[in-house]
Image (cartoon, rainbow, N blue to C red):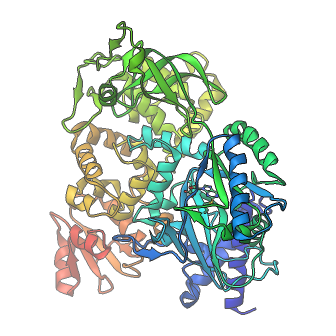
Amino acid sequence: MNQQARINQLRDQLNYHIHRYYVLDSPVISDAEYDQLFHELRRLEEENPELLTADSPTQRVSGIVADAFEKVTHPAPILSLGNAFNKEDLLEWEERTRRFMEQNGDDATQLLDYVVEPKIDGLTVVLTYENGRFTQGATRGNGQVGENITQNLLTLWALPKRIPVDPDSDLEVPARLVIRGEAFFPLDEFGKWNAGREVAGEKTYMNPRNAAAGSLRQLDSKITATRPLTLFCYDLIDWEGDVADSQWDRLQWLKALGFPVSADTVYCENIQAVAAEYDVWAEKRHQINYEVDGMVVKLNNRPLAAGLGFTGKDPRGSIAGKFPAVEKTTTLLNIKVAVGRTGILSPAAVLEPVEIGGVIVQNATLHNFDEIARKDIRIGDKVWVKRAGEVIPYVVGPITDLRDGSERPIVPPTHCPFCNDPAVQIPGEVAIYCDNPICPEQLVRRIEYFVSRVAMDIDGFGTKTGGLLAEVGLVNDLADIYYLNRDDLLALEGFKDKKVDKLLGGLEASKQQTAARFLTALGVRFVGSAAAALLLDTFMSIDRLAQATREEIEAIHGMGEGTATSVVQWFADERNQALLEKFRQAGLPFVMEQAAIDADAPQPLADKVFVITGTLPTLGRKDAKELIEQYGGKVTGSVSKKTDYLLAGEKAGSKLTKAQSLGVAVISESDLQALIGSN
Ligand code: IVH
């Protein structure tokens, strides 16, 4: 088999396995087997760069950063739907349909059957396939013109890059096919992801829909790639060739081609069955792992539906059966103030327990004190509480008409409830902070985050361990966890040999984590895992990052002013410098590792021979050596004719003289940074 054929075969196989894993949820090979195929493809593409294509499974993240989204005109209007709010509305809709059929000269007495689909609360996407390849993805925009978000959509595992996805399929693919789908965050993923952002001090999203919209409108698809977005497809917009007339068959066909289609779709043989589904769905919606705000009812006969035309923007042949919102009223009994690891003091509502959408709710978020003031929420108020996609319910607002005068205003805390230090508000920010760097509660939160799965992922470090270690005084700052000793731990209640071994083993193993994880774990405000990866991609080491200016950081795409300021301030703080030194002594990773660089960095120093001498301004000798090697260079001990560069710092001695006499290029640390392109 020639290499092109093998490459095609590997791409087909990989796309098929990606589909089994991400869409069908039923993989047929192990991760290791998948990796093997993936690596073979990557190797072949490296050896034959001319055979590389943008839609190859190895190219999920293109690395292209857009300045703005291009506008694209849809081949047909991307319409919205009219609403029905109860069963009667649905029955009336069929009556209207029959009246229109009569006017059209259709047989209005014929049996009308339907397809009921979940109305996913996500973001509409319009996907174009040409000769079986995904060529363009767009947002709905104003229905006529949308934005080109192809690069971002390419990062969705669930989106077929080529169809049919199954290499053994003999389905014919139309020369051109434009379909409509909905991109969304699964609820469980949204909850985890948003909670991770909250802990990281990053902006959280109100609901999965906003998170999906925000993720798809990133100019840097690397960011989209870190988001747990997925997709369902449900409509044909435009096509060349024959397609089935019935919606049900169209969905089966899309599924067979490899498009993700909701398994919760139901066929109904008449409108009574649809009405019965409305009751079923009103309950079922809470058991589904994505947010649905209604069900979409479609006439199964699509040519008939198309012939009925539109009212305004709404096609007559489909309707949305909207569900009542999951909001209830209850009494706000009190508020609790929690401190986060960045010191933010945040209010939570203590509610009279109330059942919302099948769950008893007693706590809800109140976001921040500004919002409480803005909405004038008072203790004792009857409040609306909403529990929708978001895992944590929230207080929507008070019902002021029901006040009897006994309600008490909520006063923002003047002191941290844990350490009693004065609370501060940073001008221009809504949050109120406990500014005490040694607030014991903050330390506990920071440890929790440091050891958590998004950060250092330390095995054996349970959620209560941090609190206990801080309480007994074994841990007074984050780095102390790497200086714990066996005997001290064994003296603690509940800590037996096995538990201590596991904890110490987990800590030791965590030193092998990536520098990006370590940077994430440090918990610099606004530096979550995506930002940490971007920062290290640019600066390569934590020491170099520590020297970076605000301008340098802001120059990175995807990095805002807030992040830049926060990073610079964090590294400028002497206490943090001391903390970093302590981590360094304990052996934590400060330099981006070889594997991460191999994966995406060019090798500008390939085969160049370096000698290092003198004291460099920011890099230690060892770090400089690692950096050079990471970019493909070699470091030797003495200057000779074979030396390409002498990297010289202050107090360079005989090596400098020798290099000069041999005509070897003498460079500074910043010259080196320029050579590797991180300056
Ligand atoms: S059909 C003309 N089917 O709900 C066809 N829409 O206003 C109109 N939606 O934002 C769309 N799930 O993006 C259809 N299974 C589904 C849907 C669905 C969600 C969204 C759609 C639009 C809104 C309807």
Q: Quadrant of residue 551?
A: bottom left
Could you tell me residue 546's position as x and y percent?
Answer: 27, 52
Could you tell me residue 186's position as x and y percent?
Answer: 61, 48
Q: Is residue 387 left or right of residue 605?
A: right
Q: Is residue 415 left or right of residue 111?
A: left
- Residue 117 visible in the displayed image: no
Q: Is residue 668 left or right of residue 255?
A: left
Q: Foreground residue, 219 or 284?
A: 284
Q: Quadrant of ligand 1?
A: bottom right
Q: Is residue 549 above or below residue 285?
A: below
Q: Is residue 565 above or below residue 301?
A: above
Q: Foreground residue, 34 or 268?
A: 268
Could you tell me residue 537's position as x and y percent?
Answer: 39, 63
Residue drawn at 48 percent across, 50 percent down: 211
Which residue is farthest bottom? Answer: 2
Q: Is residue 103 above or below residue 2?
A: above
Q: Is residue 462 above or below residue 637?
A: above
Q: Is residue 186 left or right of residue 198?
A: right
Residue drawn at 23 percent across, 61 percent down: 552
* Image quadrant where one finds the C terminus: bottom left
- Residue 558 visible in the displayed image: yes
The total number of labels drawn is 0
Residue drawn at 74 percent across, 72 percent down: 257
* Image quadrant where one finds the N terminus: bottom right
Q: Foreground residue, 677 or 505?
A: 677
Could you tell me residue 491's position as x and y percent?
Answer: 54, 17
